[in-house]
Amino acid sequence: MAKEGYYNISVNNSAKTIDMVIEGTFTPQQVEAFVKDYTTKVQSVNAGDFTLNVDSTDMDVLTQDMVPAMENTVKLYQSSGFDKMVITIKKNPILKMQLNRILRNAGFANGEIKEV
């Protein structure tokens, strides 16, 4: 069974980053709460001066039906106007390939996948 969805979003004004942790599988209600919280936090800063750090070290390889949702999420991040986005994952060539393709498809040129 998939792990229940969890997220945390924090603004670090001194480092000029918005740091997010995203884990598990989200219900539609959790997605709605995440988008609302994300929007509130991003509107509190000038996103063009910030880097979005997304800790996805607990993310699994995406199923085909999850890819469009992930693309939409990346498009949301891109539309916020971030200078750069760094997605941190555990070393996983398949997930890295999937995320690089999603970044390309979403047109997020300043997106980076970092493996730990």
Image (cartoon, grey):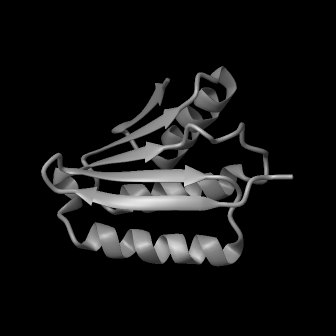
Q: How many marks?
A: 0
Q: Residue furthest right?
A: 1
Location of residue 16 with respect to 35 vertically, above or below? above
* Foreground residue among 51 and 104: 51
* Foreground residue among 10 and 114: 10
Q: Quadrant of residue 28?
A: bottom right
- Left/right of residue 19 with respect to residue 1 in the rendered view: left
Location of residue 40 with respect to 15 vertically, above or below? below
The picture places residue 44, in percent across and down from the top left corner, at 22, 72
- Left/right of residue 26 with respect to residue 40 in the rendered view: right
Q: Residue furthest left?
A: 14
The picture places residue 51, in percent across and down from the top left corner, at 27, 46
Location of residue 83 with respect to 89 vertically, above or below? below
Q: Residue at x 23, y 59 (%)?
A: 47
* Foreground residue among 38 and 4: 4
The picture places residue 11, in percent across and down from the top left corner, at 27, 59
Q: Residue at x 64, y 24 (%)?
A: 92
Q: Residue at x 57, y 77 (%)?
A: 32
- Left/right of residue 77 with respect to residue 57 in the rendered view: left
Q: Quadrant of residue 30?
A: bottom right
